[in-house]
Each structure stands twice: as C-alpha cells, then as structure tokens.
Image (cartoon, grey):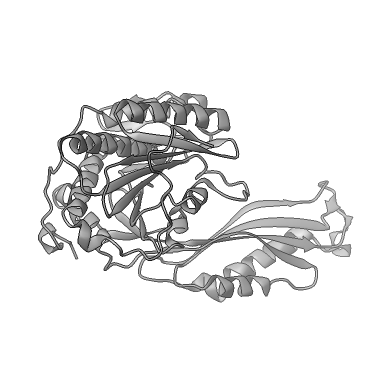
Amino acid sequence: MTLHPQQAAISIDACPIALSNADELQLAQRLIGFDSSHPDGIRACTDFALGWLEGHEIRARTFDLDGLPVLDAIVGEGPVTVVLHAHLDVVPGKKEQYIPHVDDEFLWGRGSYDMKGATATMFTVMADLALAHAIEPLGIRVRLLCVPDEEDDKPKDIRGTEAAVQRGLTGDFVVCGEPTDLHVGIQAKGVLDVRIDVEGRGAHGATPWLGVNAIERAMDIFDALKRLPFAQASSRFYERPSINLGRISGGDRINQVPDKCTMDVDIRFLPEQPVEQVREELMSLALPGCRVTEMFRRPPAKVSTTDPFLQLLRASAQLHAAPGTEVELVGRDGTNDGTYFLQRGIPSVEFGPTGSGHHGPKEKVTIASLRQYRLMLLSFLDAVAKQPEQLAGRVPHRPQDEHRDTPRSLA
C-alpha cells in the first residue's frame, strides 16, 4: 500500500528547507577520488570530510579506533535525535575506478553506489540544516556518523559503529545510507559464517579407490548443508536464506588423493529464524571426520512497520519519488551496521539512492537520485521537527551522548 503524505501523523512539505550552495554531485566526486580501501586512504578521506563539514559551520570531530578515525557531526538541538549513518571505506577497486566520471545519467567510480554518493548527499543535507538552523532553531538534533570499517571483512574486537554506540553517539532513529534504490529497507538477514574441516584418506592419484577424497566428501557435506531445514525457509521479504561457499582449500598435488579439505561458508539467515536453531542444524553436519566451527555471527535487522519515524520517512520519500513509482518497504540480503543500534532498541533502516554494480568493476549511481535523496531526507527531517515532543522518548535507556561541545579530535 502506498503511504501518502496525508496518511502520516502530520503534513509533510515537499521543499521544507532551502538548499545551501553545497553540491552533492561535486562532493561525491571528491570523495570517490580517495582510494579509501586501505587505512591511509581512509584517514585522508576522513580528514577531507572533516574539513568540509567545519567549512560549512558544522560541529564535527573524530575519535580514533585502532588507528582509524570515526567521524561524528551534529546540527541542531532538541528532544529528538535522528542519525544519518554512513561509511567512507570502500572495497578495493582498479586504479581507474578512483577517477570519477559522469555522463548524462550516471556518476561512475568505486563507492559511487556503496556508498559515497549517499554519504556526500548526507553531508549536503547537514549543510542545508546548518544554514537553516542559523536562521531559526531546528528544534531537533541531527547526527552524521561516518565510520571507516563497514566494508572490512577481517575479524575485529570492536567495529566503528559499535564503538560509537558504546560512546553514546546514538539517537532515536537511524537512517543507514546503504544502496536501496530509494526504497526503505526494514529487514536484513543475519550472518552466521562457519568453517568446515573435512578429513579423508590419502592415496596415489592412480588408485583413488584406495583413499577417501576429502574434497569430494566436502562437496557432499556442502550439498547436505543446502538441504538442511533452515535453508528451505521463506518469508514475506525473502525467498530463501543465502548460502555461499566463499573459500575452499584442499589437496597438495594433482596426483595425490587429498586427505584434508577446508570450506568457509557464509550463511545469511532470515530475521524470523533463531540463530541458535540455525547453528544447531549446521552442527549436525559434524560427523566423524568433519568439524564445524563458528567464525562470525551478526544478528538480523527488523523494524516494525508501525514505527512512526519509518512512516514519516516513507511518506517523505514518496513526495519526491518519480511519477508512478511507489516507495516500498523491502528486505535486504546483506547485513549492515544498523544492527548495533537495533541491539540497543533504536530503530534503524537502510535508505539510499539508485544505482548498480556495487563492489564490481562498473559501479555507478544515478545522478538524479542523489538530488531526490537529498530532498527526501530534508522533507523527513522537517516532518520530525514538526512533532518532536510526540516522537521523543520512544527509545528506552538511550546511552548518554558524550558529544557536547567537544574538541575537533577526541582520542
């Protein structure tokens, strides 16, 4: 069902806040120009971003997490805080992908879609808000939280968003700018990564019947994994869980029967599925000569469709959607950092511009969708500002925010 503006609790204006002279396309191109797939590039990109925010009279600072900067910026004051969540790191790309270019429709480059296009637009929204706040107080608080490690797949003791949440850098509602093609992601699959070590029996390659091929046995086990009950489940937003055999290693020589094989399997389970049930089914594969070890887990994301912030966001987005287009509530296959907020009872959704090819060689974002995204966010924030008292206090036990007139950098 399309949620029209008049169905929301208050009226929503199409152009509530005057745009500043900040240009989301130009800023996105500057951000793409930084190879932020490695620590030096992340630090350089964040330093540029911090200077850009300060140049637009926005309170901003960073704190260090294992040598990487987490950026926190604030505009406005009030009983309600909305968090715009972004990340400046990207997956590695070819050298030419860090040279942004535009055509009549698209901005091309590494991170254009995931998610420097959205990040740049969030920055310009903060500039718009700062300009408006200088004329008349917003009545709410808007936080921009920009982390350096959302794309990092290496195990870490603590991640940027998790550290920020522990410091109290949170709010009452979170918009993660991950790519959603201007729909609103209210669910995301959980993650359970496992390593499966399989034993066989070595033999000469000319007489394989004298051995037990560990790689062949591993393939049989992987096929059995895909037939487990959890793997057959479906829901309103998902046809099935995701199961990916991401890494496999085994064998030393072509003329030997391999006696060992290791598989790393990435499993994305549905929000309705208890993780312990999924884990128990996976452990049932651990027959003699097979060991299953959990490597990583992250809970799924799920936000109620009745959440008032969500309803305002969807209605605001619908105002600026292309004619005949419905802003849909969707489920996302990938995980996102919003789960750290959800664990604290803070609703978090994914909402970003239109594009394609993220993590690939032809990554691009639709230029027109960046301006749409900017107007959608401004309409949403204006709608929140019109009823802060009604929305305040919906998040129980929100951590005390430590960002109160803090210096530029906080170690």
Picture residue at 12% right of the left edge, 46% below the top: 14
Looking at the image, residue 398 sits to the left or right of residue 202; the answer is left
- Above/below status of 302 relative to 150: below
Camera-side residue: 154 or 95?
Answer: 154
- Above/below status of 367 relative to 15: above
Picture residue at 62% right of the left edge, 66% below the top: 223
Image x and y of residue 334, in percent: 46, 54
Q: Say which quadrant the C terminus sits in.
A: top right
Pick out the residue farthest to the front. 405
Looking at the image, residue 254 sits to the left or right of residue 392; the answer is right
Picture residue at 68% right of the left edge, 62% below the top: 219
**Residue 146: quarter of image:** top left
Looking at the image, residue 195 sits to the left or right of residue 38; the answer is right
Q: Is residue 346 visible?
A: yes
- Above/below status of 264 relative to 241: above
Image x and y of residue 364, in percent: 36, 36
Image x and y of residue 355, in percent: 33, 41
Looking at the image, residue 87 sits to the left or right of residue 303; the answer is right
Picture residue at 57% right of the left edge, 75% below the top: 277
Q: Say which quadrant the N terminus sits in.
A: bottom left
Camera-side residue: 94 or 205?
Answer: 94
